[in-house]
Amino acid sequence: MHVVLAAQFGLAGGNLIAQIAIFLIVYKILEKKAFGPIIAMLEQRKQRIAEGEAKLEKIATDLAAAEANAQAILNKANDSAARMVKEADDSAKALKETRAQEAIHEASQILAKAREAAQLEKEQLSSQLKQEFGRMVSDATARVTGKVLNSDDQSRINQETAAQVSA
Amino acid sequence: MSLPFSHSVSLPFMLAAHGVSPEAMPLAGFITNSIFVALIVMGLIMWVSTKATTGMTLVPHKWQNFFELIIEFLYNQVEGIVGKKVAPTAFPLLATLFIFILVSNWFGLLPGVGTIGWGEGPGMFTLTEVETPLFRPVTADINATLGMTLVVFGFWIYLTLREVGVMGFLKHTFGAKGGLTGIMGLVMAVIFFLVGLIEVFSILLRNLTLPMRLYGNVYAGENVLHTMSSMLADKGPLVSFLGAVALPLPFYFMELLVGILQAMVFTLLTAVYIKLSTEHGDEHGEEHHH
C-alpha cells in the first residue's frame, strides 16, 4: 500500500537519486565557487572597514594632539610677543627718559653758554661804551675847556665817567 | 480541472509518445520534466554565481553586490539561529537550500512551465489539455523535496555527531533532567526514556513533514493557477483567453509570496533542527544565566 501511495505521488528511486545528485552538485559548486570567495571578500571588507575606523580614530587623536600642540605654541608665542612688546615699551620709555634728560642737560648747557656769551658781550659792549663815553666826555671836556688833556686827565675822566655810567 | 499528484514524465517517454524510440536515449531514462527544470535552475544559479564571483573587487560590481547582499543577509540569519561556532559549517547547505528552493519555486511561475507540452487538441499549437508538460516546477515533484530532505537529514546527523558525539546525543535525547534521585529519579528516567523515543520518532518524522510541506504548497499553488486559468475555458475563445489571463493574476502574486515563504520555512526549520541538536550544555547554562 505504501509503495502504491509513493508511486501515486510520483516517487521513484532513479528520480530521487537524480534530484539528490543535482542538489549536491549545486551545493558543492556554490560552497566552493560562490560562498567561500564571497564570505572571504565580506570578511576582508569588514577588516578593511575596521582598519579604516582605527586609522580614523588615530587621525582624530593625532589631530586633537596637534591642535593642542599648536594652541600651546600659539599661547607661548603670544606670551613671548607680549613680553617682548612690554620689554620694548619699557626700553622705549627708558630711552625716552634718557634722551629727555640729555636734551634738558644740553639745553641747560646751551642756555648757560648763551647766558655767558650774552654776559660777556654785554660786558664787552659796556666796556666799549664806557671807553667811548669816556672818550666823548674827554673830547667834550677838551673842547669846552680848550685845554689839551694829558693822558692822566683822560684816564681820570674816563674812570669817573665809567664809574658814573656804571652807577 | 485539477492536476494528478505527479506530472513527472521521463524524457524518453515523452519522446516515445511522439515517435522517437526510448532505446535512442538509454542514458536519459532518469531525466523527467521536473529534473529537466532542476537542471535549468542549476544552470541559472551557476551562471549568476559565476557572474557574481568573477573579477571580485573590494568595491563590488553590480552582480557581486547583489550576491553579497543575499549571502550576507542569509549568513546573519543562520548565525543568529545556529550560533557562531556551527554557522560556518551549516551556512553553505542552508544558503543552497534557500537559493535553490526559491529559484525553483519562482521558476515554476514562469509562463510555459506546466502549460507547454503534449496533449490532445483541435489544431497545431492549441491543446485542450496539456497531458505531458515539458517543464514542471522542481519543488512540485516529491522526488526533489524528499531528495533535499534526505541530504539535510544526513548533514544533520553529521553535524550533531561532530558537535555532541553519539553519547552526547543519546544523553540529550533520553537522559533524565532535573537531577532527581531515588525512586523519583528512576520514575523520571523511565519517563524521559519514553520522551526520548517520541523525540526520535519526531526526528524521523521530519523526513516526511519537511518535503510534504514544500511539495504540498507548491503543488497546491500550481493547481490553483491551473484551475483559475481554465475556469472559463468553455465560454468561447475571447472570454476563455481573458479569463486565462485575468483570473490567475492575483494568485500569481500570492504564489510569489508562497515561493519565498516556503524557501524560508524549509531553511529556517533545518537551521532550528541543527540548533536544537548541536547546542551544548554549557551554552544552555550561559543562556539561562544571562
Image (cartoon, rainbow, N blue to C red):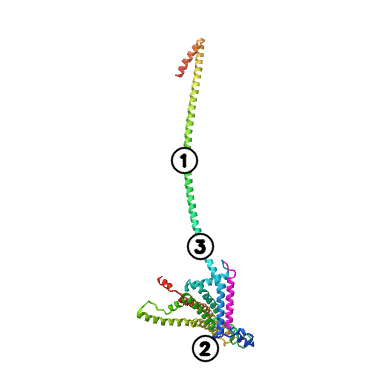
x then y, percent, for residue B39: 58, 79
Task: Name the one closer to the observer, A63 or B129.
Answer: A63
Mark 3–mark 1 Cα distance, whole angstroms, equals 54 Å
| Disc 3 target residue | A53
Image coords of residue B59 (percent x, y): 56, 66
Both marks 3 and 1 on one chain: yes
Q: Chain of mark 3?
A: A
The residue labelled by disc 1 is A90
Residue A3 got which mark?
A: 2
Chief secondary structure of the magenta portion: helix
Left or right side of A102 for B189: left
Q: Secondary structure at mark 1?
A: helix
| Residue density around tag 2, few if under 14, some if 14–19, many if 20 or more, within 10 Å | few
Mark 1 surroundings within 10 Å by alpha-carbon count, few (fewer than 14), some (14 through 19), many (20 or more): few
- Which numbered disc, 2 or 1, marks the residue that appears first in the sequence? 2
Image quadrant in which the N terminus of chain B is located: bottom right
Q: Is residue B208 left or right of residue B24?
A: left
- Mark 3 lies on a secondary structure that is helix
Query: Residue at 49% across / 11% down in the picture?
Result: A152
Q: Which residues are magenta?
A: B33-57
